[in-house]
Image (cartoon, rainbow, N blue to C red):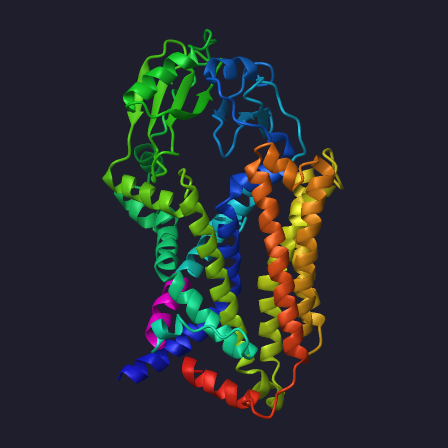
Amino acid sequence: MLDSLRSSLTWLHTWSGLLIGSLLFTIFWMGTLSVFDREIDRWMMPETRILMPDSYISMDDIRDAAADFVPADSSRWQFLMPSEREPIIRMYYQGPEIFHRVHLDPNTMEVVEGGETLGATGFFFPFHFSLMLRWNSIGYWLVGLAAMAMMMLLVSGVIIHKKIFIDFFTFRAEKKLSRSSLDLHNVMGVLGLPFHIMITLSGLIIFMSIYLPGVMERTYSGDSSNFTNEAFGDFVQQVANEPGGELVSFETLRAQAEAIWNGSEVYYARIWNQSDANATIEMRRNRDDAVPLNLDLVSFDGDSGEIYTVHESEPVMAAQRWIAGFHFIQFDHWTLRWVYFLLGLAGCALIGSGFVIWFETRRKQHELEGKSGVRIVESLAIASITGIIIATLAFLIANRLLPADAHLMGQSRSDLELWIFFLSWIATAAHAGMRSAPKTNAWVEQCGTIAAFSVVAVLLNWITTGDHLLSAFSDGLWAVAGIDLVLLANALLAYAVMRRLAQTRASKISPTEASPCQEIDQIGTEVGI
């Protein structure tokens, strides 16, 4: 009975991983990068490489500075207070046609000019959960499908591996690729199992309103605005279409909000219809000092300062926001942030090694039978794993090479960065598909490209900004230095993998060593394929 169950789950585990593995790797890779999204932003936006001021930052000073460029009739503008991770004032305002982003130096309240880019918060982070496919929420649904598959893969993986905890302490890097990949798969699976289950489950819960729209529609009689108002506390006065007076002091409102929150600071302010008699000012509570991505806010009348609403999440929504905070780790905890990053990489290794096990255990058989399955799957794996890493590095390199005012065929600078990312990704897939068997050639060449691109990105950061490692450390630019160090570590790892794969391809079986077929048969028996 148990053996029959294991056999069924093995089939499910193998083919689910094969069909959804590429999408899962993409989601895990972008999610791992998003752990340090603000630090990557500072690397990609040299104008933000400033130090957090020691003096108090007045919100009234920010309001006065915004008056120089925010149109008086703007329907909405907002700003985020600086923090240690992001020591600039990030401001957005609604223009006649588009939404604008502006950075202010908190030391001088002057606009900081720089090259237009989405950075990690504008690209890596939303790509992680939406794949940048917003039409009919199709990206969210694909990610949800991948999350459900990941849950199934994790549970089935525990059941089908008979010696999973024993195998956790066994990693034979010197063995054949098929054996070392299986060992790596087991180790990474057990090491990150609790994290991977929680991070996958929490990802599903965060977007409950998308995945279970019928529940909200039935509860709120089809009026989604009532759900939004109750869950998120959004409150905006109806436009009076009459001119309003001067906005009340932001510092006064800030003090009132922080008193309501027992001293917890305001990190965000949003102003609706500032020139209208019914202007509304919204203050939101800081999220750095606790796990939840809280939705606590206070709304004020813009002219009198009268409090309209004080919103705190109800129990169900509060639980959902705690889960969201756990998933996105926006709270201030550097040790956990590194743990998330390393376990995210473990998830990438888990998915990648699963691919390698599949085609390495079938390569000989498919060659004898003249099948092309291994070649197709390996090409897909190369594009999914090394390909997206190369595309990410190309994105960073483009950020340092494109002029600040770059435009081409109606595309903005940030659009050009995205084009370079996706075209690079497509190029790696084409390279993998055109390489003749054995496919190890493509792995070696793309690992070499990763190593080279990583070093080039570090050098370009030095050349274009002057912030080499020693300079970044001496100036206290820890985020910039950290990204450079991670890039160099990535180069070393990619070079080591390239050497290992090159040696594997060139090596021959010694007389005392098991034949490839014998070893593959044994591994196939262990994993049930």
Viewer-proximal residue among 447 and 222: 447
Position of the N terminus by quadrant: bottom left
As drawn, which residue projects farthest toward the left? 315
| Residue at screen point 60% across, 55% down | 490
| Up/down of 36 relative to 297, above or below | below
| Residue at screen point 41% across, 78% down | 11
Quarter of the image where one finds residue 448: bottom right
Q: Is residue 135 visible?
A: yes
Marker count (numbered): 0
Quarter of the image where one finds residue 425: bottom right
Q: Which residues are magenta?
A: 148-161
Position of the C terminus by quadrant: bottom left
| Residue at screen point 47% across, 65% down | 350
Tell me if residue 158 is in the magenta stretch. yes
| Up/down of 316 relative to 184, above or below | above
Quarter of the image where one finds residue 158: bottom left
Tell me if residue 24 is in the magenta stretch. no
Q: Is residue 231 left or right of residue 389?
A: left
Residue 445 at x, y = what percent?
70, 66
| Residue at screen point 61% across, 46% down | 484
